[in-house]
Amino acid sequence: MNSEPIRPTPQEQLVSLVPALRAFARQFVRNGSDIDDLVQEAVAKALAHVDRFEPRGPDAMKSWLFTIMRNTFLTQCKSRKRSPIGSVDDLASLEVPVHSNQEMALFANDVRAALKNLPVKHRKALIYVAWGLSYEETAGLCGCEIGTIKSRVNRARGHLAARLNGANVSPDTRGSPIRKS
């Protein structure tokens, strides 16, 4: 009997990481269909070159896929810059977007600042779950129980919501959304 665990194929690993790819794609694009397009293109490129993948650790596939997605996005940006915009009449008929890039950039900075104020345990749990990992996977990575992860994620969300709504919440203050566990 062989006691060695069965390892998933690179294709199976790739399929299992699609939720994490979708979460990562949100860093680049906001529209749901754009997210789907970016994930699809990254997965297609990865499948076409899966023979080049070299496993070098437990998170090698995820790193490889994230690199492919980032490079795909950057390539798309470069090609958009080179493509002609159209006539002045075409531009005049376009609707103004609801949110400007400046507002989104400011909001992203606020989120980053609020994340930095979280205790490391809470920040890691929230980020893993936001990347699409299950509570079970996150608990395994953090070395604690699922209930602890759920609690940390809930506290982190509460802290972020309070921070982003203008409340000044200290992660060390008793009675705040964040309590050390």
Image (spheres, rainbow, N blue to C red):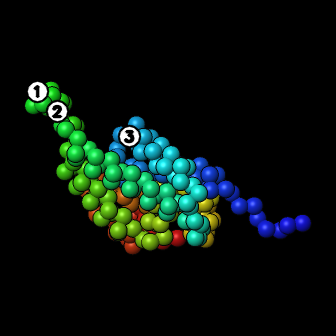
Circle 3 packing at 10 Å, graded few (<14), some (14-19), many (20+), is some
Nearer to me, 102 or 14: 14
**Mark 3 and mark 2: Cα distance apart in space:** 21 Å
What is the three-letter code of the residue carrying label 3? Asp
What is the three-letter code of the residue carrying label 2? Gly
The correct choice, above or below, for 54 with respect to 95 in the image is below
Visible residue check, residue 134:
no
Q: Which residue is at a point 39% across and 73% down the rendered structure image?
A: 172
Residue at numbered disc 3: 34
Q: What label does residue 32 carry, if any?
A: none
Q: Position of residue 21 (x, y in %)?
A: 48, 51
**Mark 1 and mark 2: Cα distance apart in space:** 8 Å
Residue at numbered disc 1: 89
Q: Which residue is at a point 71% across and 61% down the rendered structure image?
A: 7
What is the three-letter code of the residue carrying label 1? Asp
Q: Secondary structure at mark 3?
A: helix
Q: Which residue is at a point 22% across and 45% down the rendered structure image?
A: 82
Visible residue check, residue 42:
yes
Q: Position of residue 39 (x, y in %)?
A: 46, 46
Q: Secondary structure at mark 1?
A: helix
Dot placed on the residue nearer the N-terminal end, 1 or 3: 3
Which residue of the protein is positioned furthest toward the right in this rendering? 1
Residue at numbered disc 2: 86
The correct choice, above or below, for 166 with respect to 95 in the image is below
